Image: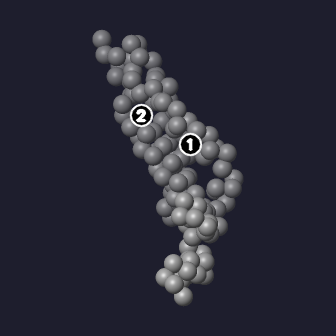
Amino acid sequence: MPPYQAAQKLAEDFHIIRGNTYKEMKPRISEQMKYYQQEQKTFRLLNDYCLFLEKWREDYRPETPDEDFHPLFIESLHKYEQYNYYRDIFITGTEDERREFMEVCGKEIAALEERFTQPIKTKRSKSHERE
């Protein structure tokens, strides 16, 4: 068998690539691999959000008792414990717990992902600057 045909046969037997031309050849991804990739993406999103919340709690903490609370500071107070718990599911939880979380909280995570594709205002407004 010529080398090219042998390579095609191996690729077909091991489900490595599909397509008739080089440009159409793409790796086949199993359902389990797709789930694993989604799980990793979800964990990274939760972790990044927790890191933002921690940063916002520090960066937007009122500097005087009379200063108004910045919305990102308030968000950090309201959301950190909840999302830290979610993140812990992916760190210490079982596969079943992670799978259940992704099924139950899928819309919430999609909304969070959508939010992170939008620019986030991180500068203090004039009322939050030191005078």
- Residue drawn at x 64%, y 62% is 99
The percent position of residue 80, horizontal first and vertical second, equals 50, 42
Q: Residue at x 64, y 55 (%)?
A: 102
The residue wearing badge 2 is: 56
As rendered, which of 97 and 4 lies closer to the eye? 4
* Residue 39 position within the rendered picture, expressed as x and y whole percent measured from the top left: 56, 59
Disc ID at residue 113 = 1
Residue 52: image location, x then y, percent: 43, 39
Q: Is residue 40 visible?
A: yes
**Going 42% across and 44% down the picture, which residue do you hit?**
51
Instruction: Specify which label sits upstream in the sequence, 2 or 1.
Output: 2
Disc marking residue 58: none
Instruction: Name the element at disc 2.
Output: helix
Label 1: element kind: helix
Label 2 or label 1, whichever lies nearer to me, is 1
Question: How busy is the neighbourhood of tag 2: few (under 14 within 10 Å), some, or many (20 plus)?
Answer: many
Considering the image in quadrants, where does the N terminus appear?
Answer: bottom right
Q: In this orientation, which residue lies closer to the viewer: 31 or 104?
A: 31
Q: Quadrant of residue 97?
A: bottom right
Answer few, some or many: residues within 10 Å of disc 1's Cα (few below 14, many 20 plus, some between 14 and 19): some
